[in-house]
Image (cartoon, helix red, strand yellow):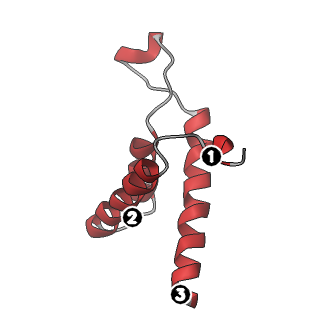
């Protein structure tokens, strides 16, 4: 149970760091005129690859991240506090 709690906390911290990066980065190239920020899962993949995690870890993180987002009906965390 303790290890599971640590894993959840670690994923939460990783998600926060990814979210901060998402706010700062924009797409380059074709969509640079729109100045749209990159999608959260794309940033997560880039962050995981930057840390040289294995492909299976990347796949697992993306799986859990997608399910977490879908579980909360794609709402922003600020809405949950209400």
Name the spot of residue 40 as percent of width and height, x first.
46, 42
Work out how far the residue at label 1 is from the one at label 3, CA to CA, in angstroms: 25 Å
Q: Nearer the viewer, mark 2 or mark 3?
A: 3
Q: Residue 52 carries which label?
A: 2
- Report which residue position mark 1 lands on: 77
Work out how far the residue at label 2 is from the one at label 1, CA to CA, in angstroms: 28 Å
Name the spot of residue 38 as percent of width and height, x first.
46, 32
Could you say whether the residue bearing mark 3 is in a helix, strand or loop?
helix
Q: Is residue 2 left or right of residue 72?
A: right
Work out how far the residue at label 2 is from the one at label 3, CA to CA, in angstroms: 23 Å
First along the sequence among labels 1 and 3: 3
**Residue visible at 44% across and 53% down in the picture:** 71
Question: Tag 2: Cα neighbours inside 10 Å, few (<14), some, or many (≥20)?
Answer: few
- Of 6 and 82, which appears nearest the observer? 82
- Of 21 and 69, which appears nearest the observer? 69
Q: Do the residues labelled 2 and 1 touch (CB within 8 Å)?
A: no
Name the spot of residue 72 as percent of width and height, x first.
49, 49
Q: In this view, does 58 lie above or below 70?
A: below
Q: Which of marks 1 and 3 is in front?
A: 1
**Residue visible at 50% across and 28% down in the picture:** 37
- Report which residue position mark 3 lands on: 3
First along the sequence among labels 2 and 1: 2
Could you say whether the residue bearing mark 2 is in a helix, strand or loop?
loop
Question: Tag 3: Cα neighbours inside 10 Å, few (<14), some, or many (≥20)?
Answer: few
Could you say whether the residue bearing mark 1 is in a helix, strand or loop?
helix
Q: In this view, does 82 lie to the left or right of 8?
A: right
Residue furthest toward the right?
82
Q: Is residue 18 left or right of residue 54?
A: right
Q: Which of marks 2 and 1 is in front?
A: 1
């Amino acid at each position: 149970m303790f290890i599971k709690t640590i894993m959840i906390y670690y994923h939460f911290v990783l998600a926060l760091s990814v979210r901060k990066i998402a706010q700062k980065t924009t797409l380059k190239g074709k969509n640079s005129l729109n100045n749209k920020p990159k999608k959260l899962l794309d940033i997560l993949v880039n962050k995981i690859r930057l840390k040289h995690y294995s492909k299976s870890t990347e796949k697992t993180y993306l799986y859990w991240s997608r399910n977490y987002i879908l579980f909360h009906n794609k709402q922003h965390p600020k809405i949950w506090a209400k």
